[in-house]
Image (cartoon, coloured by chain):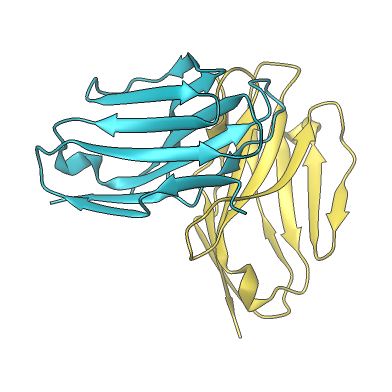
Chain colours: A yellow, B cyan
Amino acid sequence: AQKVTQAQTEISVVEKEDVTLDCVYETRDTTYYLFWYKQPPSGELVFLIRRNSFDEQNEISGRYSWNFQKSTSSFNFTITASQVVDSAVYFCALRSTGKLIFGQGTELSVKP
Amino acid sequence: DTAVSQTPKYLVTQMGNDKSIKCEQNLGHDTMYWYKQDSKKFLKIMFSYNNKELIINETVPNRFSPKSPDKAHLNLHINSLELGDSAVYFCASSQDSSRGSIQYFGAGTRLSVL
């Protein structure tokens, strides 16, 4: 069975703080893909990153970075020097068979 | 140019009515999806079509019927609307149905059943 757990329901930080959003997944498949999506207050879902199970390289894109660790089945997302515009719900998702399975989402609030 | 567009953005209707939500993608993708996001923000897939053929059909009431007239369009028709159908419905598309194919989402349709 596939499962994605985002244990942090809500996080509140002050602008310029660094923040890490946790994602733990479960799958018995050896080949799978992990994704992060952002849902800002306007409601749309925006794709951020995709990582396959054979590529454990961490990735950095501007203030965003992702840490993929197969040993702990985690795919964590860090925002460095957070900004108010980062306020959103962030979803981690897993696809190892037919369906894309989403975590419950973490609502990030960045205060000025 | 909006890649995945849904209409309408908001839909308010009475219980028992029938309504449709339309989705179109201009990305040239082969696969399209419908998702439901409930009041707790939980996202769950409902249906998926690949080249107009149904490939994923989750445990969804028969009142929900997807229709794909061509691979660029996937509409969702809902009969006899119930209060519990109130949610945000998202359409998405991907290049193909492979597990690594990135899904791009529309802006969502907020359905309120009164």
Q: Is residue A94 above or below residue B108?
A: above
The residue nearer to you, when weighing B9 against B37, is B9
Q: Is residue A16 above or below residue B22?
A: below
The residue under the point 50% across, 17% down is B52
The residue under the point 70% across, 59% down is A20
For the question of whether residue B73 can be seen, the reply is yes
The residue under the point 63% across, 21% down is B97
The residue nearer to you, when weighing B90 against A16, is B90
Residue A2 locus on image (x, y percent): 57, 24
Q: Residue lying at the far right in this picture: please name it.
A: A57
Quadrant (top left/top right/bottom left/bottom right) for the N terminus of chain A: top right
The residue nearer to you, when weighing A71 against A29, is A29
For the question of whether residue B41 can be seen, the reply is no
Classify residue B108 as left or right of residue A51. Answer: left
Residue A51 locus on image (x, y percent): 78, 36
Quarter of the image where one finds residue B19: top left
Quarter of the image where one finds residue B90: top left
Quadrant (top left/top right/bottom left/bottom right) for the C terminus of chain A: bottom right
